[in-house]
Image (spheres, helix red, strand yellow):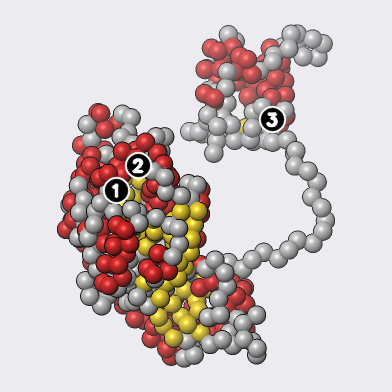
Amino acid sequence: MPISQTNFAWATLLEVDPPKRGRSRLHERLAHALRTAIRDGRLPEGAAVPPSRALAEELGYSRWVVTEAYAQLIAEGYLSARVGSATRVSWAPDTAPPRPHAARAPAAPPIRYDLAPGLPDLRAFPRRRWAEAVRAVIGSAVHYDLGLPDPTGHPVLRTTIAQYLRRSRGADAHAGSVTVCAGITDGLVRTCRALRAEGITDLAVEEPGWRRLHDAATSAGLRVHPVPVDEEGLRVDDLAATPARAAVVGAAHQFPTGTVLSPARRARLVRWARDADGFVIEDDYDAEFRYDHHPVAVMQGMDPGRVFLLGSVSKTLSPALGLGWLVAPAALIPALRAANPVTAAPPVLDQLALATFIDRGWYDAHLRAARRRFRARRDLLVRTLGARVPQGRVGGTAAGLHILLHLPDTVDTRAAVRAAAAAGLRLAELDDYRAQRSAGCALVLGYGNISDSEIPPAVDLLRQALVAGRTTSGRA
């Protein structure tokens, strides 16, 4: 990015020599000072020099002196000037070390198709309505909205989120229990710090699960205990055998297995939290997308005194917005605030834009359209896999933005992922989300950020990668 001339104190930067033989005229001495500053790197390439009148006033010279110096350096190639634009430095010293002549490794091929999980349909981001929400906020924000932000989030957005969670997710939430954060990972770090301050040192996480949640917990000083997941969700009996007094769970749609926590497990998990004097941290990361029936309500509504609720717009709108929320039990709100005294809320104007986007009904409309689109895309992916990869078995609930593709033991999924990457297809294997490699073979296929027309050629590349990853003696 070009550097503005206001970054420099020009009278101090330029060392204009006194008159000497061969360089007695002032414009020559000024040109020499500018040339030296450029060669030394004090004026980097792209930096704008001041208008001739401004520099003349600062240095106490006539404007003619400055224009003559600039003209000389333009002729020599040190400066460049265009009509209607600032005069800028167009030369840089060659300070890079000499490059070795050894052969370079071949560049990785570009990714043509992305079947890795983690992203929504970025092509479908509602740009026009989001821009309208931003414009509305800028036009209506009062002056104190532009001051120091509330670290818990703007009251307008906290109220809007609480109302949204009550009507759409069955949560027991109010503005005072909501904290606006930068996303689920940020919310989990804040929660773990609060639990650590309350004397809780051990946290259970689902196995397999997001490694980022594991890293967030350890960064907050907690010991992490992986607990297996089966077809009914987190195995609460195994959880009870650990020293953990808190557990992170994807109740509505577990990642990456795609299971939904059964009603019996939900009730058992809440009882465990009460018996252990502990807490459940509910990761509600993509629960808005359920295609076989209405989304399951959050666990937090069953026991708001024992369950934290984490959510964001990263899977519904875009992770680039960096907007999420944390609903905390009332008894832990003081600890949450005290344990995170220097954390900052997302930008206030972005918060108010999200509140406007939700209040005007645009968020609900976007979700309805997204559900229809993702359901059709999931069906297309499942049909294409059935026709072209018949050895695979699709697992997971009809929800979210990914499926699990179980494969025969004769496939080395790690080799298949490498072969796919070499062909321009991004994949992820189930073991990417495990603490240790397992005996089962499966791929986690995301369909959020791929177009419908790209699915058939992507599956063709997947089929070829599976052939390349086939082994004769099971997994490598």
Amino acid type, residue under disc 1 in the picture: Ala
Residue at horizontal 37 percent and vertical 78 percent from the top: 231
Residue 212, position as x, y percentages in the image: 48, 57
Task: Determine whether 186 is above or below 145 in the image.
Answer: below
In this picture, residue 22 sits left or right of residue 193 = right
* Circle 3 residue: 41
Q: Name the residue nearer the viewer: 14 or 276.
A: 276
User: Picture quarter containing residue 279?
Assistant: bottom left
Q: At 40% across and 51% down in the image, what residue appears? A: 188
Q: Residues within 10 Å of mark 1 (few under 14, many from 20)?
A: many
- Residue found at x 46% / y 80%: 405
Query: As shown in the figure, which amino acid type bears the numbered disc 3?
Result: Gly
Judged by depth in the image, the label closer to the viewer, 3 or 1, is 1
Residue 319 visible in this rendered orientation of the protein = no
Residue 297 drawn at (x, y percent): 23, 65
Seen from the viewer's position, the closer of residues 26 and 420 is 420
Give the percent coordinates (x, y) of residue 87: 57, 30
Marks 2 and 3 sit apart, C-alpha to C-alpha, by 48 Å
Amino acid marked by disc 2:
Leu
Residue 375: quadrant of the picture: bottom left
Question: Are the two marked residues, 1 and 2, in contact with CB atoms closer than 8 angstroms?
Answer: yes
At numbered mark 3, what does the secondary structure look like: helix, strand or loop?
Answer: loop
Quadrant containing the N terminus in the rendered view: top right
* Mark toward the start of the polypeptide (1 vs 2): 1
Closer to the observer: label 2 or label 3? 2
- State the separation of the CA atoms marked 1 and 2: 8 Å
Examine the rendering and report whether any part of residue 297 can be seen: yes
Which residue matches tag 2? 336
- According to the picture, the residue beneath numbered tag 1 turns out to be 328
